[in-house]
Image: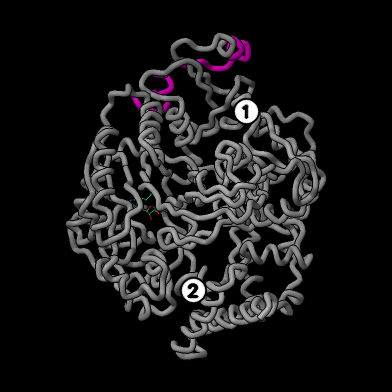
Amino acid sequence: MNKKKIEAEYKKKIKKINNLNFFYYDQSNPLVTDDEYDKLKNEILLLEANNDFLKSEISPSQTIGHKPSKNFSKITHRAPMLSLANAFTKDDLINFEKKIFNFLSVESNFKINYSAEPKIDGISASLIYKNGELKKGLSRGDGKQGEDITENLKTIKNIPKRINSKDFPKDIDIRGEVFIQNSDFKNLKEKFANPRNAASGSLRQKDPKDTKKIPLKFIAYTFGFEKDLCVNNQFDFLKKLNQWGFKTNPLNKLISGVDNLIENYNKVEKDRANLNFDIDGIVYKINDFALQKRLGNVANAPRWAIAHKFSSNKAISKILDIDIQIGRTGALTPVAKIKPVNIGGVLVSNATLHNEEEIKRKDIRIGDTVTVERAGDVIPHILEVDLKKRIKDSSKFIFPNSCPFCGSKTVKDFNLSTKKLDAVRRCSSQDYFCEKISIEKLKHFVSKEAFNIDGLGKKIIENFWRLKLIKYPHDIFRLDYDKIETLEGWGKLSVENLKYSINEKKKVSLDKFIYSMGIRHIGLENAKLISKYFGTFVNFKKLSKKKNYEELLNIDGIGETQVNSIRTFFSNKINIKILEELENLLNITNSQIEKKNGILKNKTFLVTGKLKEISRAEIKSLIEANSGTTVSSVSKKLDFLIIGEKPTNRKVNTAKELNIKIINQDQFLKMLNKI
Ligand code: IVH
């Protein structure tokens, strides 16, 4: 058979199996017997094994196990479910601790106790208990909103349905990990690639009876919302969890000092293979809740915790080709297409090469035999080249000087903070000129942390683009649904679903909106700062009329790099047009000013000089927690200049000239009734 025919047959089979999946999982109406289904699946896998060129993102080899049903209702978590920053080396841990010392403004001999908890690689869940009764169980979802999977979670024996202990809080979210033990996974090996997939697939089954068939376990480790929790540190909380009837990890330890953390890490890693559950690292949490509270969060992760990941899985493979991919900001990322290898239960066929410098430094060439590493959820990368196996006539890889997609020149930017040229090369075209960048921008626009539109995955965006159904973000809200219904793979039901999920997202908060614009250097955290500063979409849009963007430097956290990027964004007519179109189509809600009625409401602050036993970062979060704002320069907008030791004279003098109140640290703390 020739290539084309094989491909056509393959596509037909993929389409068929996905149709069977739809009827089985979404409609609960299987069209064929299990045997027939397995036969078809094996035929697909065999075709892939024998023909390197066959590839499909919706092949059963990629969408391992059960396709979960999408019909769960969404519920907002009462406290967001955060993620964790990663550490890989001792230096990462030292750095983590150093940042904490700085924030708390303590000396480096300050002793911090950590709760060290082996990180089970499963699926997190949040259980809502009211008056001791399990009321609801949610999946993590995007961290803000989860899915209501109560009935499925209730099938898990380890999850108490009723707790009678007197000291169990009246209202609390208990959080932990749902997983499958390795001994139980043995019987499921045929269906799933690894225990994590098995847990996730079975947890999201439509029928709880299907979930019940799988021996899921639950280990508790934290809480979300709580009322009247009677403990003040994590380790006591873990003990309490046990008393209340939850399972906790038997390997949890209370440890202080980086050296001791490493010793424990090495011990656990050695024993890892003998455990009956998969762990991918150790989570360290500052034990004292009062310190946790002071430290607070950055973006989506707490400052007081980190995940120390185990060294990854490695495999040897061969570089078949080097592709250049482009991101939404125009960054060109080289990607090695490698001969597919199984690394820790996942079939890897791509490895990132990071940037031009990395290729040069490691002299990576097409045809090389390489060691590929995959650590947890991090994208696989090339560790080293086996030079002994290099083919004789191989040549150095030359990074393109012009964008492979639109032909514009590629450039390296000058980084204002490092005062060096970036390692990353970019396409220098303006927004929406390079088609590939536009597609990436659209993918970003609908992504989880931006508009979060269900059912508009990356492949669909690409497809709609190719069919000229979308070009700019606003086109998403004006889709030609009649046309989509006639497309291959689409039907009445799926179009209705898509329409529903798009319309559902027409109401959007200003910070999400700003983030979704994909302005370079404006991530979630900066988008929040900007949205808080402007308050309304109308105010934000006024930037397009301004000649001077310096005012943005008043926002604490926004620097010259961000300001330049915002200026570039507003200088492009297409971006202005997009803003106008979206303004008409959407309901962009004003920035919510949290805790409106704190003591420092409507007051602005600036600190100059060194303070006693409190860091700049902490004073900033203290001000914000009490509804005040911090600014980064002395201007008429400033209400209070807080001075510490060795203040900057220029700031003090300007403040005097402008009649701004100058206070010291004690006076400030008095405002908060702290002393
Ligand atoms: S605490 C503090 N504790 O790791 C907010 N998470 O990357 C984070 N995980 O989604 C949750 N074991 O699925 C926490 N002992 C543990 C954990 C743990 C595993 C997972 C959890 C979370 C992810 C964060």
What is the secondary structure assignment of the residue under circle 1?
helix
Q: Position of residue 300 (x, y in %)?
A: 47, 46
Residue 458 showing in the rendered view: yes
Residue 490 showing in the rendered view: no
Q: Residue at x 35, y 35 (%)?
A: 90
Determine whether the beta carbon of the residue marked 1 sits less than 8 angstroms from the nearest atom of ligand 1. Answer: no
- The correct choice, above or below, for 632 with respect to 423 in the image is above
Q: Quadrant of residue 153?
A: bottom left
Q: Amino acid at mark 2?
A: Lys
- The correct choice, above or below, for 54 with respect to 409 in the image is below
The mark nearer the N terminus, 1 or 2, is: 2
Q: Residue at x 29, y 66 (%)?
A: 182
- The correct choice, above or below, for 35 with respect to 387 in the image is below
Circle 1 or circle 2, nearest the eye: 2
What is the secondary structure assignment of the residue under circle 2?
loop
Residue 554's disc number: 1
Confirm or deny contact between disc 1 and disc 2 (CB under 8 A): no
Q: Quadrant of residue 503?
A: bottom right
Q: Is residue 674 magenta?
A: yes
Q: Residue at x 45, y 29 (%)?
A: 617
Q: Is residue 316 magenta?
A: no
Residue segment shown in magenta: 653-675
Give the labeled residue for mark 2: 67
549 displayed left or right of 556: right
Q: Position of residue 362 (x, y in %)?
A: 55, 39
Q: Callout 1: few (<14), some (14-19), or many (20+) C-alpha neighbours within 10 Å?
A: some
Q: Position of residue 9 (x, y in %)?
A: 64, 81
Q: Residue at x 68, y 63 (%)?
A: 461
450 displayed left or right of 129: right
Q: Nearer the viewer, residue 380 or 463?
A: 380
Quarter that holds the N terminus = bottom right
